[in-house]
Image (cartoon, rainbow, N blue to C red):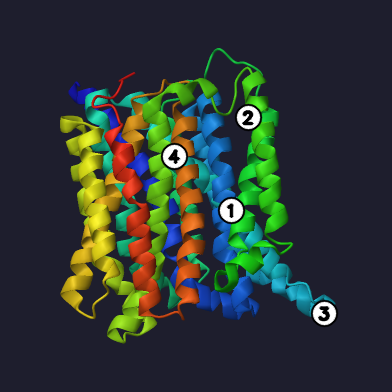
Amino acid sequence: MSKENKYESNQILLILFFGVLMGALDIAIIGPALPAIKNTFNLSTRIEAWIFSIYVLFNIMGIPVNSKLSDRVGRRKIYNIDLLLFGTGSLLVVFSPLFLIFNQISLSSINLGFIVLLLGRSIQGFGAGGIFPVASAVIGDTFPPEKRGGALGLIGAVFGIAFIIGPIIGGALLLIAWELLFLINIPIVVILIYFSTKRLPSRPNIDQKPFDFKGIIFLLIILGTFAFGINQIDESNILLSIKSYLVLPFLAIALIFVPIFYFTEKKAKDPVIDLKLINNKNLVLANLMSLGAGFVEATLIFIPSISVMSFSLTESAASFMLLPLVITMAIISPLTGRLLDKIGAKKVILIGTFILISGLLLFGFLNANYAWFFITTILIGIGLISLLGAPLRYIVLNNTSEVNRASQQGFLSVFSGIGQLISGVMVGGIVESLGYGLLGFSIAFITVGVISTVLIFESFFLKSKEIST
């Protein structure tokens, strides 16, 4: 790679890095802001949860739509649209408290301000759904195969960095007003759109076939109803809540539309999911392993609660117990990326899954000892970034062509999100059934560790050398 091409590639990488960082920060800083938002809109704890849940729901739905459009009309255009959506949603969240005035004037019981906030979070989530898959696809378009691992590793480090600086930024801005947490997105969006318009490649698919509207609609129905149904399950009584009108009908709709979607895709000229890629063993395994990685990732949200019980910490202090884990992920991700370019994905994933499962099982033997706690969570971080970071995306990049690169990257994120939803319910159910104590968390982590051994068997079937395109 010439100096000029290297300089251009580094500029592109910087634009992608800050775009993904912005989306990741919005997840990292929402936790500290929830109490202030709850007080502003006078919310119950159950309703408050929708501030996060609706973002996740629309994020999952936005991934396949944005990714597919990126393959059709070009990376730059969709990346900019995603940034614009994210900024628009952020503005709605910022101005949502102003709509509380209408409640005072009309004396209505409808919390219009909160509805506007949820609308903003929905638009944010939908836009953010395309940022990471499109960024990964751009790397595949602009970097040679022998450099893709390192670039993906740097992008993967964003999430660890976000969770390090997120609480610091959030804490500082919360001293003034929680709205600033979202207002800060606006200048970043403007700057990123300006530079991406100048630097990002835009090569739309010339061979344009009819857009698969039916496939997109059916896929959104499947993902939306499944995510909503799973989100409404009450962990304290899983079996009873599954039968409720907020869960069972939605899961049933998702199940019914799966075969409808399948046969629609078989007939589509430009399907959302190219069914021919099902014959690619590496791609199938990558998606299944992304499901497993998401399944493990969801356990991280319980670590602060475990810290409170194990070390008698305040909730504020307990949130910092995640720092060794996220710092490890931020450091290991670029190193993992470089290893991919040298030894390939299979070896990296095999080593990573062994470390991940060891960390989960050892953490399951909970011990009120700081050294034990940090060592085991660091092992989990090393193992997790060996899946969620660059390796799986590296496999997908090297087994797809430019015409379906983003959509396949998107499905990695979809499967990861599904894994998170399922795991959150399962872990919560185990903990609640055992009295919400350390024993419940211990059993839950050991269970997740045992289930995750499937990842080792899957990684053995990966091809030693990926197909570069």
**Nearer the camera: disc 2 or disc 3:** 2
Q: Gap in Å between the C-alphas at discs 4 and 3? A: 46 Å
Q: Amino acid at mark 2?
A: Tyr
First in sequence: mark 1 vs mark 2 = 1
First in sequence: mark 2 vs mark 3 = 3
Q: Gap in Å between the C-alphas at discs 2 and 4? A: 18 Å
Other-residue count near label 1 (Cα within 10 Å), few / some / many at <14 / 14–19 / ≥20: many
Q: Is 190 rendered above or below residue 260?
A: below
First in sequence: mark 2 vs mark 4 = 2
Q: Amino acid at mark 4?
A: Leu
Residue position for label 4: 412
* Label 2: element kind: helix
Q: Which mark is residue 265?
A: none
Residue 83 visible in image: no
Residue lying farthest bottom? 312
Identify the residue at horizontal 66%, vertical 57% (top origin): 119
Residue position for label 3: 107
Other-residue count near label 4 (Cα within 10 Å), few / some / many at <14 / 14–19 / ≥20: many
Q: Quadrant of the C terminus?
A: top left
Instruction: Indicate the quadrant where residue 302 lies.
Output: bottom left
**Nearer the camera: disc 3 or disc 1:** 1
> Mark 1–mark 2 contact, CB under 8 Å?
no
First in sequence: mark 3 vs mark 1 = 1
* Label 4: element kind: helix
Residue position for label 1: 57
First in sequence: mark 4 vs mark 3 = 3
**Nearer the camera: disc 4 or disc 3:** 4
Q: Which mark is residue 262?
A: 2
